[in-house]
Amino acid sequence: MSEAGRQSFTDKAGAALKPDSQKSTTEQAGDFLKGKSDSAASTVQPNSHKSATQQVGDSVSGNQNHNQESILDKAKNAVGLGEK
């Protein structure tokens, strides 16, 4: 379970697993804004104040208080569904 004020893990997974080519422009923009907002919330909250579950969720999604490609993005890129 994600913490209050953060994007839920199921929403993140749903957005990551659906190829951008199958999303509307509005859906892509919404995913982008939600992702940036969640990343900002992750960055401003110190890891010492996050639950163990949130730390794992941030690790999987790449929100670890620094910019790096997430495990989900790496997987999408490996099978040709990512942007890179």
Image (tube, helix red, strand yellow):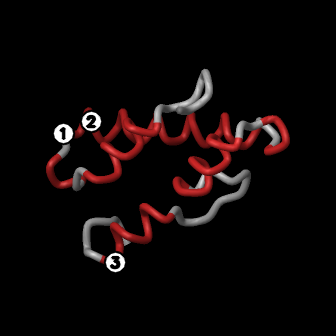
| Mark 3 Cα shell of 10 Å, populated few (<14), some (14-19), many (≥20) | few
Label 1: state its secondary structure. Answer: loop
Q: Amino acid at mark 2?
A: Glu
Could you say which disc has been placed on residue 24 in the image? 1
* The furthest residue to the bottom: 78
**Picture coordinates of residue 34 (x, y %)?**
46, 34
Instruction: Please name the residue shown 79% across and 45% down the image.
Output: 47
Q: In the rendered image, which quarter is residue 81 located in?
A: bottom left
Label 2 sits on residue: 27
Label 2: state its secondary structure. Answer: helix
Looking at the image, residue 36 sits to the left or right of residue 81; the answer is: right
Q: Nearer the viewer, mark 3 or mark 1?
A: 3
Image height of 75 relative to 18, above or below: below
Q: Amino acid at mark 1?
A: Ser
Closer to the N terminus: mark 3 or mark 1? 1
Instruction: Please name the residue shown 53% across and 32% down the image.
Output: 1
* The furthest residue to the left: 22
Q: From mark 3 to mark 2, how far is it between C-alphas?
A: 23 Å
Image height of 14 relative to 34, above or below: below
Q: Amino acid at mark 3?
A: Ala
Confirm or deny contact between disc 1 and disc 2 (CB under 8 A).
yes
Q: From mark 3 to mark 1, how far is it between C-alphas?
A: 23 Å
Label 3: state its secondary structure. Answer: helix
| Mark 1 Cα shell of 10 Å, populated few (<14), some (14-19), many (≥20) | few
